[in-house]
């Protein structure tokens, strides 16, 4: 009959315990050379372990930084598409309003006047020039009033930068100058969004109501000559068109400011190898 096995052998002590046991033995025998050697082995092992951990953490951070910067580049390209669409719409509104006012009053509006605020919330200064545009295209000539009162409001994407900020990890981007540029760009976009949400969108409702009292719909073609006669005869319509021209110029200035910063950021990131 097979005999039962004896108790299992205890597991070997961990390496650290063996080192400490050897050091204790060397101390009892006053073998100072061996003590120093064992001590240096322990210190060197701890140092190498810490360095390996730091190197691994740094490598992880660099990979995260590269991924974030690639995402920011993607966001910036998307932003520029949005801003380009907004710019085209603002110029369309300037062209349509300017054309109607010139035909109705016999003079071309070349400068606008108004209070100046700051670079993040651009407004009209004294003698602000009206951008020179070509005449409205054939489609807009058949719908000049809708061209004036229909806006496009760019919605930039700042997902990557906002996620980084929310997580409190701006330190992942090692280039402090790039961080400052990104923060400045975000502030300009905030100003653009504030203008769109607090001024452009709310006031356009009243503008359309003014048009409707004169038989002008934002969704129907209007005969150009009929519109010109209405504007020539109505100070309210003339003032409304001049205001819309001014708001379009403000919008255009803010869009251009944001786009210039986006171009500069993309150039900086391109030089760093992120396209």
Image (cartoon, helix red, strand yellow):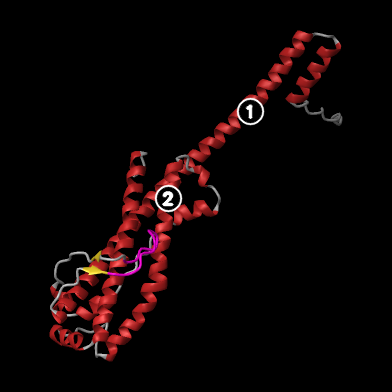
Mark 1: secondary structure: helix
Q: Which residue is mark 1?
A: 49
Q: Position of residue 85 (x, y in %)?
A: 28, 64
Question: Quick check: is 60 in the magenta stretch?
Answer: no
Q: Position of residue 40 (x, y in %)?
A: 70, 17
Write the start and end of the magenta stretch as one range.
Answer: 113-124
Residue 64 marker? none
Measured along the vertical axis of the image, is residue 61 above or below residue 128?
above
Mark 2: secondary structure: helix
Q: Are the two marked residues, 1 and 2, in contact with CB atoms closer than 8 angstroms?
A: no
Q: Residue at x 36, y 63 (%)?
A: 122
Residue 93 left/right relative to 224: right
Q: Residue at x 54, y 47 (%)?
A: 169
Q: Position of residue 148 (x, y in %)?
A: 25, 76
Residue 37 left/right relative to 60: right
- Look at the magenta stretch and give its main secondary structure: loop
- Residue lying furthest front: 126
Q: Residue at x 27, y 63 (%)?
A: 87
Residue 157 appearing in the image: no
Question: Quick check: is 114 in the magenta stretch?
Answer: yes
Q: Position of residue 211 (x, y in %)?
A: 27, 86
- Closer to the camera in the image, 97 or 86: 97
- Closer to the camera in the image, 179 or 248: 248
Q: Looking at the figure, which quarter contains the N terminus?
A: top right
Q: Residue at x 23, y 82 (%)?
A: 238
Q: Which residue is mark 2?
A: 182
């Amino acid at each position: 009959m097979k005999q039962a096995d004896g108790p299992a052998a205890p597991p070997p002590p961990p390496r650290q315990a063996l080192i400490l046991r050897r050091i204790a033995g060397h101390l009892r025998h006053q073998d100072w050379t061996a003590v120093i050697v064992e001590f240096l082995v322990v210190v060197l092992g701890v140092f190498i372990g810490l360095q390996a951990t730091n190197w691994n953490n740094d490598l992880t951070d660099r990979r995260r930084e590269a991924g974030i910067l690639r995402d920011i580049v993607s966001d910036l390209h998307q932003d520029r598409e949005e801003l380009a669409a907004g710019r085209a719409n603002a110029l369309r509104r300037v062209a349509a309003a300017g054309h109607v006012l010139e035909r109705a009053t016999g003079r071309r509006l070349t400068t606008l006047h108004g209070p100046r605020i700051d670079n993040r919330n651009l407004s009209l200064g004294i003698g602000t020039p009206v951008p020179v545009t070509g005449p409205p295209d054939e489609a807009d000539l058949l719908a000049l009033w809708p061209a004036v009162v229909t806006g496009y409001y760019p919605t930039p994407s700042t997902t990557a930068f906002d996620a980084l900020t929310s997580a409190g990890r701006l330190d992942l981007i090692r280039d402090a100058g790039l961080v400052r540029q990104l923060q400045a760009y975000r502030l300009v976009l905030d100003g653009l969004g504030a203008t769109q949400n607090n001024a452009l969108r709310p006031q356009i409702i009243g503008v359309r109501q003014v048009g409707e009292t004169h038989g002008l719909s934002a969704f129907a073609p209007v005969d150009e000559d009929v519109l010109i006669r209405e504007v020539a005869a109505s100070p309210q319509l003339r003032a409304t068109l001049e205001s819309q021209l001014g708001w379009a110029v403000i919008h255009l200035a803010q869009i251009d400011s944001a786009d210039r910063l986006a171009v500069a950021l993309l150039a900086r990131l391109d030089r760093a190898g992120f396209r």
